Every structure is written in structure tokens, then in C-alpha cells.
Image (cartoon, rainbow, N blue to C red):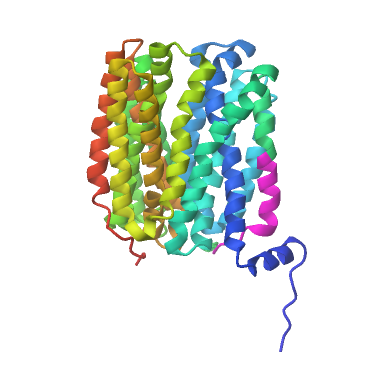
Amino acid sequence: MNETVAPPGWRARRADYESDPRYRWYVLGVLMVGVFSSSFPTTLLSASLPDIAADLHTTRSVITWVSTAPSIAFAIGMPFFGKLGDLYGHRRTFIIGFIGVAVTALLTSLAWNAASLIAIRTIGQMSGAATSTSAFGLIAATFVREDRAKAIGLYTSVLAMSPVIAVVAGGPLIESFGWRLLFIIQAVPAVLASIVAFPILPETARRAMQRFDLAGALTLGAGVTVILFSVNRGKPWGWTNPIVLGGFVLGPSVLALFVRIERRVRHPLLPLTYFNRRNFSTPILTNGLVQCAYIGGFTVAPFMVKALFGYTTRKTALLIAIRPVFFSIGASVAGRHDQRLGARFIQITGNSLLTGGTLLTAFAAWHRSLPLTVISLAVVGWGVGYARPANTAAVTNAVDMADVGVAAGIQNMVGSLGSAVGTTVMLAVVGESTDGAVFAHAALAGTAIAIVSIFTGSMIEPMTRPAD
């Protein structure tokens, strides 16, 4: 009888961890440290853009690309890295991604001009896309189907709370020592996640013999990039600008080419047959609609608070933080309800709260009511947070384990598209106005989108079925 020799170093330690009944929670803990790092700077960075522009001697129109370019890169990177994780292992993709996050965070703190800052941040967000999709792949590999919504709920709650902690704890430090400290702070948990991932995270199945669908990845990425760029530039450049109009023609044309490629290749980026499964296509569509209403409203909220109540930037940030705080609470609660209540009930409930909260925002703006504004932020945050874990779990449960990474990437990419559309629509409604009635009209637009999300959410099957 042959003896099995224990693997050396961190492999031996991982073997010890895997024998522990709490092992899956160790894995989730590592993933939560990672997501804390990747989402940490987002809110505070946006609030610091005027100061960054002054420090780097650039214009407002240029510095906005510090947020725009990385957002586009994150959206198109998720399916790409999700598929790489499916083929070559999510553990490997996660670790490489977080090494990239740590390195780019430190390099960002040393940015010497606007171009270097935009370029480094964009690479950093691409690394973040690798970790995000790999995290869902690792959750699917570690947790049984019945417990995935709970794990995703805890993971998502950290995703929402990290920027809030940055504003509350990091805000005073940034005001005292400058914006570069933000990225030095971000690097600390990124380095920690990279180190502890080696002995703890499990290996996932690899399909090294299967070729990566490069043509599919390039056409999907190009099509989505062109559409996102056109949506983003529509307001500042004008919707009749030839580049904007050309993008709205070119983008869908390239995506049509993507579909044609996927139907012909032996190993597609994403099997198109998944879209025939109701618990794959419907949650993805619903997520896009929810993000359209949620992020669109979240983008307008600081302008509304400043215009109607005369708050400073810091007071505005603290008030707006109510929404992600309640998102986090809702997500953590929902994870415990998924198996008892079902994905459809949770999605309808969460989207109904989004609708009611967004409608309440319209009343708050119309009457210039601070208490109603606070309540609306809490209701919307809770509703979207409550629905998110079940939505994500439905998608990951609807596909084969070998495609969990790319499925999560597609879901998040559609969410990014919805966010871009919602932000553009609501900012176009508001314009430069400081009138409460105008902000109410923007909220009513978000309410209409949220109502549609209730309908699509009701089409999710009551209980998630295992993939065929």
C-alpha cells in the first residue's frame, strides 16, 4: 500500500485547513478581506477628484476619467477573467489579481500626472475584475448550493461597507495628509489577502486542454466598451455627436458578431444555451434594471443633498453612506432567508422596496424634506442589498460548475451597463438644476425602471434548480 506524502509548505497547511469543519468560512474570510481592499477607495476617490485635479494640475473633464476608464475596464474584464478562472483555476486568478491590486495601489500613490493616474487605476480595476469573478467561483466550489446565498450575502455586505469605512475612518486622514494616502491604505489588506490566500484558498477544477475563446472575448469586450463609452460621452459631447452615434451603431454590430462566433466555436466563452434557462437570463436582466435605478439614484443623491440642504462634501458623504450601510444589513439578512423563502420572493420583496424607496426620494425632493431623504436612502439600500445575494446565487446555481466564473462576469457586466445607463439618464434629467422638482423627476424615472424590475424578478423560478 502506497503512502501519500504530505505536500510541503503552504500545501501542507492547506491540507490541515481543509480537514477543519470551519474551512469554508476561512475561505470566505479571505475573500472578504480581498473585496474590502478592492472596493475601499471608490467613494472617497470620487469625493477627492477636485483635490486630485488641483494637485496634478489638470482639468475637471480630464480627471473624471480616473473613475470612467477604470469602470469600463472593470465591466469588460469580468467575463474575460471569469472564463480564465473557469479554465485555469479560480485560486490562481484570485491570487494573481490581488497581487495586481496591491502593486497598482502603491503605484497609484506615486502617480506623477493625470495620464499615469488614469492608466494605473485602469490596470488596477482590471486586476479587481479578476478577483471579483474568482471570488464567486471559489464560493461556488466551497459552499453547497443551499448555502451559497448566505455566503454571497456576507461577501456582498463587506463589498458595500468597505467604501463607507473609507469615508468615516479614512476621510479625516485624507483631509490631513492628502489623497495619495488612500491608496497606501488600500494596499495593506490587498497584500494581506494575497499572502493568506496561498495556504487557505482551495484549488478548483482546471480545463487546461480547452482553448480560451479569444475571438469571443475580444468581440464581447469591444462591443461593450464602445456602448459604455458612447453612453458615458453622450451628455458631455451631445447625443448627436458623430462619435457617440457611431458607437451606438458599432457596439451592437460587434456584439452581433460575438453571438455569431459563439454559435460556431467548439468551446465558446459562454454557452448561449444558458440564456434559455430562466434562472440564468432573468436574474441577469433584473440585475441590470436594478443597477440602472440604484446607481443612477446614488449618483444624483449627492447633488440633491448639496442643492436642497446646503451640506458640505463631508456631511453629504456621511449622509449618503446610509444607503450602503443598509445595503450591507439587507444583504447579510437575505442570505439566511434564501432557502426558506426562495429567490423569487426575495427578489420581488427587494425590488418592491427599491421602488417604494425611490418614489419616497421623489417626495423628499419635492418637499425638501431631510427626514424623508434619510428614510428613502435606508429603504433603497436595504431593498437592493436584500435582493442581491439571491439574484447572484440564482445565476451561479443555474450554470454548470465549469462556467460559474464567466456567468458571474456576465451578470456583473450587465449590471455595469445598467449603472451607466441609469447614471446618464438621471444626470441628464437633473442637468445643472438645483430645483427640488427636477430632482423629483429624476427619482420618478428611477421609480419607473424599478417597477419593471419587479416584473422581471417575478419571472425567476420560486426555488433555484440545479444545473442540468
Is residue 190 shown in magenta? yes
Horizontal relation, residue 33 to residue 289: left or right: right
Q: Using the rendered image of the protein, determine whether residue 145 is visible from the camera's viewpoint.
A: yes
Horizontal relation, residue 251 to residue 25: left or right: left
Q: Position of residue 93 (x, y in %)?
A: 58, 51
Residue at position x 34%, y 13% from top? 431
Q: Position of residue 12 (x, y in %)?
A: 73, 66
Count of numbered marks: 0
The quarter of the displayed image where residue 442 is located: top left
The overriding secondary structure of the stretch rendered in magenta is: helix
Q: Using the rendered image of the protein, determine whether residue 179 is visible from the camera's viewpoint.
A: no
Which residue occupies the foreground of this view, 172 or 33? 172
Q: Residue furthest bottom?
A: 1
410 lies above or below 341: above
Q: Position of residue 416 (x, y in %)?
A: 41, 36
Residue at position x 53%, y 62% from top? 142
The C terminus is located in which quarter?
Answer: bottom left
Q: Please state the extent of the stretch shown in magenta in the rendering.
A: 189-205
The N terminus is located in which quarter?
Answer: bottom right
Horizontal relation, residue 423 to residue 348: left or right: right
Residue at position x 48%, y 26% from top? 68
Q: Residue furthest front?
A: 371
Horizontal relation, residue 321 to residue 431: left or right: right
Is residue 313 shown in magenta? no
Q: Position of residue 391 (x, y in %)?
A: 37, 49
Residue at position x 29%, y 53% from top? 344
